[in-house]
Amino acid sequence: MTKLLKILFVCLIAFNSACVFAGDLQQVKGQGLVGEQLNGYLGVVSSDASAEVRALVNDVNAKRKAKYQSIASQNSTSLETVELLAGKKAIEKTQPGNYIQTATGWRKK
């Protein structure tokens, strides 16, 4: 259990760091164009999302994946475990009114 808590803590740090390099992330989340997915990555919610928004999502997700892989390697666990823990924390931290992925699809938190 202690190891799991350490992984969770590191995921939380990684998620916060991911938001720093994505200056427009909060803006596009607030517009309902993107949201947090269960797998720890951003997803495009709206079909109206521009190429720039999609590029931002791809950039953030690539950086998140690199951090998740590093965390998984450091903790001798799977990438999937880290992704799922990060997804859970990201959804918990999502501001009301922004989109999150659920088992049944996208919904506003």
Image (spheres, grey):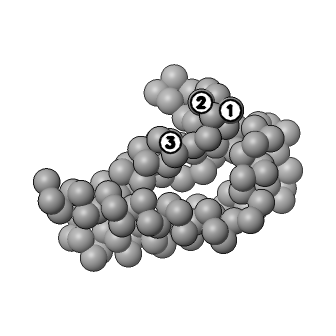
Q: Are marks 2 and 3 in contact (CB under 8 Å)?
A: yes
- Secondary structure, mark 1, is loop
- Secondary structure, mark 2, is loop
Tell me the residue at 28%/62% (across/down): 7
**For marks 2 and 1 on the same chain, the one whose residue lies earlier in the sequence:** 1
Give above or below for 52 relative to 50.
below
The reply to whether residue 31 is in sight is yes
Give above or below for 25 relative to 49.
below
**For marks 1 and 3 on the same chain, the one whose residue lies earlier in the sequence:** 3
| Position of residue 86 measured from the top left corner of the image (x, y, whole percent) | 42, 53
Q: Are marks 2 and 1 in contact (CB under 8 Å)?
A: yes
- Secondary structure, mark 3, is helix
User: In the rendered image, which residue does mark 1 sit on?
Assistant: 97
| Amino acid carrying mark 3 in the image | Ile
User: In the rendered image, which residue does mark 3 sit on?
Assistant: 91
Q: Which mark is residue 109?
A: 2
Q: CA distance from mark 2 to mark 3?
A: 9 Å
Q: Is residue 22 left or right of residue 103?
A: right
